[in-house]
Image (cartoon, coloured by chain):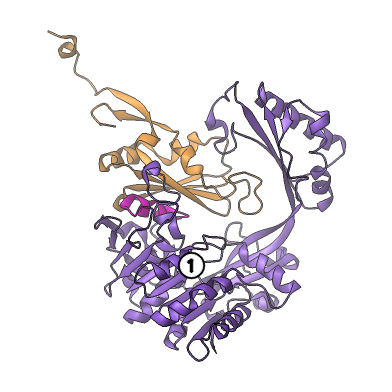
Chain colours: A purple, B orange
Amino acid sequence: MRVASGQGFWGDWLEAPVRQVEGGPIDYLMMDYLAEVTMSIMQKQRSRDPSRGYASDFVPLMERILPTIVERGIRITANAGGVNPQACAEAVVTVARKLGLAGRMRVGIVAGDDIMDRLDELIERGHALANMDTGEPLRVVRERVLSANAYLGAAPIVEALGRGANVVITGRVTDTGLTLAPLIHEFGWTGDDWDRRAAGTVAGHIIECGAQCSGGNCLVDWESIPGLEDPGYPIVEAQEDGTFVVLKHPGTGGRISVASITEQLLYEMGDPHQYITPDVVADFTTIQLTQHGKNRVRVSGIRGRPATEFLKVSIAYFYGYKAVGTLVYAWPDAYKKAQAADRLLRARLARLGMEFEEVLTEFVGVNATHGRLAGSPDPDAPEVQLRIGVRARDRAPVERFSREIAPLILNGPPSVTGFAGGRPKVEEIVAYWPALIAKSEITPRVEMLDA
Amino acid sequence: MGAKARRPAGPPARRAIQLRYLAHARSGDKGDTANVGLIALQPAYYPILVKEVTAARVARHFKGMLTGAVDRFELPNLRSLNFLLHGALGGGGTLSLKTDAQGKVFSTALLRMEVPIPTDIDV
């Protein structure tokens, strides 16, 4: 029973799903498209055009692999539906018909995660939807909310698979649910089998970021990792008892080792004793990893506890504006020139009476990623990039800031270049509001669409 | 008799070493919190990490770079420690103006930290 990872985020390598389908035997292909702020981008797209609001890259990808997956009986789970899984499913069905697959496949749609239209009713009935980080109730930002989606678990995907879907397209389902659902469906794991559910969840966590567990972004011996021009994306080969092996197709690049899997396990980790999903609470301190041959890591021993009574809700709201400008200063005295330019710019903004929530200066090549820990800068540095960012609730000061960068080229410190990109772009900030809601309030919806 | 043999008995000599020689690491974000997973390169190094890389010392290492506290969790099964660095990301997510708004390379900043190790440990 093999579940392969095809996409680790919206924007991941377009060849990966094709390689996974063609490179060797797999039973399922999972594709993760949704990050915290993705839903609000999709919401914006849908408000402009009701036929959009999903990961548009998914449809041409399906066009490339649908004939093969239908032929070989491979099934797909993907949260590519975003805020409009119905439209995404319809687009896939259109492609399927064009490929001559009419009558040969069905698409499952998982929805019910979108609670945008129910917010006022929920608040009125006493759901504060308090921010998990700050404790503030949602009503503080209610007027500015752009999207609100509960994280669904594996259950509705399992239902869609049970009803014969070749491709399951979901809205906001947890990344791990996309892997756990096929395992529950195939092995018939019961609802209270917490250890197995935890194992399937850990399997999902390992492969949900694509090649980040199989040699990509891997710090250990990074220079010796072979063949990253054609990285093997991870595959989980699972047993009914909840143990599994992480592997990749033969002949692909990358590396699967205890070290590479450990790095991915710790990615975005909070309290390892309680990795909470809608399906289970997994205990990451029980995971045992053993190298089981070349590019094969066996995972076992995983324990889980009953799921909580809550679902996480991902709410996006409009916050304000920001812009980031950069200039490059060359040797000699590159860093001193960049520092002088920063002082000039700040003084000019102050004289204009511009008020910002924050003005942040970084010197790329000196301290941008490690701050003061980077130590004293090399006085002979060939170049330093000045990078200044501003954030404000109003657009006007950010807009004015974006016009104050270019003048520095002619009226500031010398030896400056790197302004090919033009004026910094003023961006709208969509902020993230994590909250919890009682599971009893959310009813997932599963529908089928035949090609 | 050589000088070595005459050395008085006492605590074993110690030296300081950067964490990069004892561990590898990966980091990510949750809102304005960065997490750093610190993983021992050899089983023998894990007890050194547990003893020396305390939450308090990590907080000191990042002094001035965090607005919140540091939490530490132990994962002996993975020979790893997980650190939560609260208030590390300039507001986090889309609010942050930082190059590393999602804390992707905070991990490597921790690897700069120096810890004392016994001289009988081979690195």
Residue A308's x, y, as percent? 45, 71
Report the magenta residues as a range. Answer: A255-270
Q: Residue at x 66, y 46 (%)?
A: B97
Q: Amino acid at mark 1?
A: Asp
Q: Quadrant of the C terminus of chain A?
A: bottom right
Whether residue A190 is visible? no
Task: Relative to A376, say whether B75 is above or below.
Answer: below
In depth, the one of A433 and A169 nearer the eye is A169
Task: Relative to A438, say whether B100 is above or below.
Answer: above
Q: Residue at x 37, y 48 (%)?
A: A226
- On the rendered structure, is B77 left or right of A88? left
Residue A266's x, y, as percent? 41, 53
Residue B103's x, y, as percent? 54, 47
Task: Relative to A116, say whether B7 is above or below.
Answer: above
Q: Which residue is mark 1?
A: A175
Q: Residue at x 26, y 43 (%)?
A: B43
- On the rendered structure, is B78 left or right of B93? left
Q: Chain of mark 1?
A: A
Question: Magenta span has A64?
Answer: no
In depth, the one of A125 and B60 nearer the eye is B60
Task: Relative to A267, say whether A280 is above or below.
Answer: below
Question: Magenta span has A259?
Answer: yes
Q: Quadrant of the N terminus of chain A?
A: bottom left
Give the residue at the far right of this rendering: A352
